[in-house]
């Protein structure tokens, strides 16, 4: 039974890592393709005009996956992961300044930052839930 739980944990770790890198690549591709191709994807949703909601959601999920990835593999590199995600977002936005078919918008960087902040809050809430759960279990079964 113990071997099966270790196997499942390893599979979850691999899935989180895969999703993290898949999202990094997807955000990079969506940041450099022409606006006309992106409009075909996003125009069906009026709520998402400007793409700010997409920025916030994408970077919140990216941050959350990055934090889980850091927790599972690196243990103490959360701040570095956050910094790298923010730098990645800023570089992608600055790259759009030099692309003739894209426009640079500083509000996109702000939306990325808001998304990262939301991802951090969600991860902190997750950690608090886990900590409270462990405390309750330890209180129920003292040594």
Image (tube, helix red, strand yellow):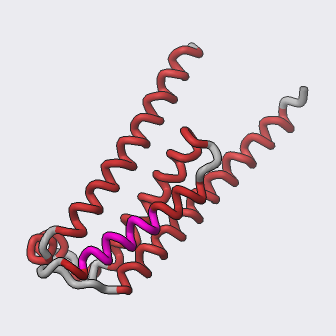
> Where residue 139 appears, x then y in whole percent?
86, 38
In the displayed orientation, state which residue is furthest to the right: 143
Q: Residue at x 67, y 46 (%)?
A: 130
Q: Position of residue 48 (x, y in %)?
A: 28, 79
Q: Indicate yes or no whether the magenta region holds residue 89.
A: yes
Residue 46 x, y percent position in the rendering:
22, 82
- Residue 99 x/y as whole percent: 17, 77
Instruction: Tell me what residue is drawn at x 34 percent, y 79 percent.
Output: 52
Q: Write down the quadrant of residue 89 in the picture.
A: bottom left
What residue lies at 38% left-to-right and 86% top-to-bottom? 107
Q: Residue at x 54, y 22 (%)?
A: 5
Q: Is residue 128 left or right of residue 111?
A: right
Instruction: Look at the image and tell me in which quarter the C terminus lies.
Output: top right
**Closer-to-camera residue (46/39):** 39
Identify the image quadrant of residue 23.
bottom left
**Could you tell me how many numbered marks the image carries?**
0
135 versus 24 height, above or below? above
Query: Please, is residue 128 above or below residue 98 in the view?
Result: above
Q: Quadrant of residue 124?
A: bottom right
User: Is 78 displayed left or right of 28 in the figure?
Assistant: right
Q: Which quadrant, please, contains the N terminus?
A: top right
Q: Which residues fall within the magenta stretch?
A: 85-96
């Amino acid at each position: 039974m113990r071997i099966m739980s270790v196997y499942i944990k390893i599979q979850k770790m691999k899935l989180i890592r895969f999703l993290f890198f898949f999202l990094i690549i997807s955000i990079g591709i969506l940041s450099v393709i022409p606006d006309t191709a992106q409009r075909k994807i996003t125009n069906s949703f009026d709520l998402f005009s400007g793409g700010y909601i997409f920025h916030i959601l994408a970077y919140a999920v990216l941050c959350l996956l990055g934090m889980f990835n850091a927790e599972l593999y690196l243990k103490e590199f959360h701040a570095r992961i956050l910094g790298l995600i923010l730098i990645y977002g800023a570089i992608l936005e600055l790259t759009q300044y030099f692309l003739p078919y894209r426009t640079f918008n500083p509000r996109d960087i702000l939306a990325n930052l808001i998304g990262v902040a939301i991802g951090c809050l969600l991860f902190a809430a997750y950690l608090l839930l886990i900590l409270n759960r462990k405390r309750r279990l330890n209180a129920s079964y003292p040594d």
